[in-house]
Amino acid sequence: MSEIKRVEPLVLIFSGPSGSGKSTLVQKVLELPGTMPSVSCTTRPRRATEATGKCYDFVTSEQFDAMVARGEFLEFARVFGKHSYGTPKKWLEQSRSKGLDLVLEIDVQGAALVKEKLPESVAIFILPPSRQELERRLRSRGMDADEEISRRLAKAKGEIELAEKFYDFCVVNDEVERAGREAQAIVVALRCSSLRRREVVKQVLGSFGG
Ligand code: 5GP
C-alpha cells in the first residue's frame, strides 16, 4: 500500500476580546490530539497567575527587537499601545515537521497579518454573548480598574467590527462547555474537508484496483 502523502497541518488562529474566555476555549482545542500551541513572545511583565504557566515566553524589549531584526516573527504587534507581542516562526516550522495542527491565540491585527501571509490559515473569533455579559466577566475577574474596563469594552467593540470582515468562524462563548465543544468541532470538521482528505480518497480508490 503506498504511503499517504501528508497535507500541511492546519494553522488555527483564535482571537476574541479580553474577557471572552478565549484562553479557556483554546485549552479545549489543545486537548485534541494532533494539535500544538504557538507560544508567543511578549515584553509585558508576567502576571502572578502566570508564574507556573507556559502561556508566553517573557522577553525584554531588547530581546524582542533583536528577534524582529533577525526576522524571527511570523507576525508581531504592539497591543494596548504598551507591550509587544509576537508569534515566532519556529512554531510553524515545528508544526510542519511534526505534522501537528498549530493553535495561535493572538489579537485581531495579528490575525490579519497571519491571514495575509498564510491565506490557508483559519481564523476563529470568540464572541461574548453581549456587552453586558462581557462587562460582568471583566469586573468579576477583579483585575482591572473602572477606566481599564471601559478601555477594554471600547476595544472589544472595535475588534468585533473588524473580525466580522475576515474571520472564517465565530463561536459565541455563552456557556463554556458548549462553546468548547463547538470550537473542537470546527477543528475536527476542517480535518475532514475533502481537500485535506484528497490523498486518502485516492488511496481508497486505489484499493479498488485498476
Ligand atoms: P494578554 O497580555 O492579556 O495576555 O494579551 C493581550 C492581547 O495580546 C490578547 O488579545 C492576546 O490574544 C494578544 N496576543 C497574545 N500573543 C500575541 C501575539 O503573538 N501576537 C499578537 N498580535 N497578539 C498577541
Image (spheres, grey):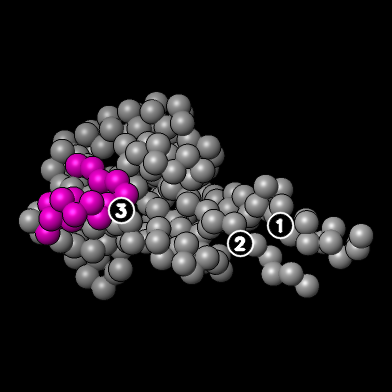
**First in sequence: mark 1 vs mark 3:** 3
Q: Is residue 23 visible?
A: yes
Asked whether the residues under the numbered discs 2 and 1 touch, taking CB atoms below 8 Å apart as contact, a structural biologist would say yes
Residue at left offset 39%, top offset 26%: 161
Instruction: Give the tally of numbered discs.
Output: 3
Q: x, y percentage for residue 75?
A: 29, 46
Sequence-wise first label, 3 or 2:
2
The Cα–Cα distance between marks 2 and 1, rounded to whole angstroms, is 8 Å
| Residue assigned mark 2 | 6
Magenta segment: does it hold 32? no
Residue 187 location (% of width, % of height) = 58, 53
Secondary element at tag 1: helix
Q: Residue at x 78, y 62 (%)?
A: 203
The mark found on residue 87 in the picture is: 3
Q: Which mark is residue 154?
A: none
Instruction: Indicate left or right for 62 with 81 as reference.
Output: left
- Amino acid type of the residue tagged 2 in the rendering: Arg
Please tell me which residue lies in front, 64 or 70.
70
Could you tell me how far apart the alpha carbons at marks 3 and 2 are, in whole angstroms? 24 Å
Q: Position of residue 7 (x, y in %)?
A: 59, 57
- For label 3, the crowd category at 10 Å Cα-Cα, with few meaning under 14, some 14 to 19 and many 20 or more, is many
Q: Is mark 3 within 8 Å of ligand 1?
A: yes
| Contact flag, marks 3 and 2 (Cβ < 8 Å) | no
**Quarter of the image with the N terminus in it:** bottom right
Rendered residue at 68%/65% (across/down)? 4
Identify whether 136 is placed above or below 50: above
Separation of residues labelled 1 and 3 (CA atoms):
31 Å
In this orientation, which residue lies closer to the viewer: 100 or 169? 100
- Image coordinates of residue 15 in percent, x first then y, are 40, 44
Rendered residue at 35%/32% (across/down): 159
- The numbered disc on residue 199 is 1
Q: Look at the image and give the residue range highlighted in magenta.
A: 63-78
